[in-house]
Image (cartoon, grey):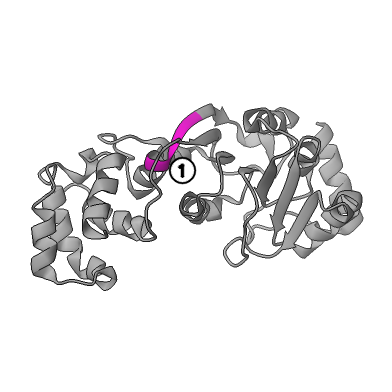
């Protein structure tokens, strides 16, 4: 494979190997890179956020069609990226940020396209969904995680991440079964390529929707009314009123008797706005 040859060359030249601690699995299948680029529907006016640039195989293709903000934690890989794309960095077409996605401030992008470390999957999706910057996001994640992201109410994998993403985005899985052979080293499971397109005319909710969902889904198999009752000790920290008022607001929910796992993303948003006006 062409990309595997290039990766081997970089490893020999810079004296590094994939870091298990950082969750590094480098893509070596050019067709996967191209599918990500195609799904991103890039324009020259786009600025794409790439989390975990690695040695720059995807970065190179993104730069042909757009500007890129790249985040990379590994200092050796940042050195490789600096050497490969010095011209683009100088022209401000590539802004390279050395650091952890968890800690860096990010803004100024309108799309996301990346193959991030799978250990950061949940953190990435919860943070990006709440930022409201991206109109389109394209990821390769572990297949099991993608199934959770795109699950609809009533399905076993439906959870807080499903409801959050389902409220803000339409999703499409481009490829469910990406073989471990597409990466070096091989991950333990299959991966999937998924696209999230931000819904138009969806009201942006106040901060707090994410923890609201996480606390309700602690009681996924209970009725929403019971889940709210049990979640109240966790939710009350963000409320400026007491239990009596909370119960009154809960009584206004026409779907309170539904199981949490059957409540739609839109209904969760309605509930959130009743408790956090």
Q: Where 193 sits versus 218, above or below?
A: above
Task: Say left or right for 17 vs 191.
Answer: right
Q: Quadrant of residue 277?
A: bottom left
Point 66% across, 48% down: residue: 49
Under tag 1, what secondary structure? helix
Q: How many marks?
A: 1
Q: Nearer the viewer, residue 123 or 242?
A: 242
Q: Where 194 sits versus 275, above or below?
A: above
Relative image position of residue 8 (x, y in whole percent): 84, 45
Relative image position of residue 231 (x, y in whole percent): 20, 62
Q: Nearer the viewer, residue 60 or 253?
A: 253
Q: Where 188 sits versus 130, above or below?
A: above
Relative image position of residue 191 (x, y in whole percent): 55, 37
- The answer to whether any part of residue 25 appears in the image is no
The stretch drawn in magenta includes residue 171:
yes
The stretch drawn in magenta includes residue 143:
no
Task: Say left or right for 136 vs 87.
Answer: left
Point 65% across, 53% down: residue: 108
Locate the N terminus by quadrant: top right
Task: Say left or right for 80 vs 256.
Answer: right
Point 25% across, 66% down: residue: 235
Q: Where 233 sits versus 256, above or below?
A: below
Q: Quadrant of residue 162?
A: top left
Q: Nearer the viewer, residue 114 or 20?
A: 114
> How many neighbours does mark 1 have within 10 angstroms: few (below 14), some (14-19), or many (20 or more)?
some
The part of the chain drawn in magenta is 167-172
Point 62% across, 36% down: residue: 180
- The answer to whether any part of residue 72 appears in the image is yes
Look at mark 1 in the image and give the residue it sits on.
145
Task: Say left or right for 241 vs 104.
Answer: left
Per the picture, the main secondary structure of the magenta-coloured stretch is strand
Relative image position of residue 266 (x, y in whole percent): 29, 40
């Amino acid at each position: 494979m062409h990309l595997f040859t290039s990766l081997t060359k970089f490893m020999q030249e810079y004296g590094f190997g994939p870091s298990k601690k950082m969750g590094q699995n480098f893509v070596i299948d050019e067709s996967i890179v191209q599918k990500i680029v195609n799904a991103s529907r890039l324009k020259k006016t786009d600025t794409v956020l790439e989390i975990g640039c690695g040695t720059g195989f995807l970065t190179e293709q993104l730069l042909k069609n757009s500007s890129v903000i790249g985040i990379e934690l590994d200092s050796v890989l940042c050195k490789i990226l600096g050497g490969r794309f010095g011209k683009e960095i100088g022209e401000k077409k590539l802004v390279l940020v050395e650091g952890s996605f968890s800690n860096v401030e990010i803004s100024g992008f309108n799309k996301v396209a990346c193959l991030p470390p799978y250990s950061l999957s949940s953190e990435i999706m919860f943070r990006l969904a709440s930022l409201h910057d991206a109109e389109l996001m394209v990821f390769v994640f572990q297949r099991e995680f993608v199934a959770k992201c795109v699950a609809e109410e009533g399905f076993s994998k439906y959870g807080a991440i499903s409801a959050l993403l389902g409220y803000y985005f339409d999703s499409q899985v481009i490829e469910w079964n990406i073989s471990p052979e597409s990466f070096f080293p091989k991950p333990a499971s299959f991966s999937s390529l998924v696209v999230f397109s931000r819904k138009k005319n969806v009201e942006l909710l106040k901060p707090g929707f994410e923890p609201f969902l996480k606390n309700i889904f602690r009681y996924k198999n209970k009725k929403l009314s019971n889940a709210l009752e049990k979640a109240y000790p966790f939710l009350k920290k963000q409320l400026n009123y007491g239990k009596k008022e909370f119960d009154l607001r809960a009584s206004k929910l026409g779907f309170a008797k539904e199981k949490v796992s059957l409540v739609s993303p839109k209904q969760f948003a309605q509930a959130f706005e009743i408790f956090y006006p």
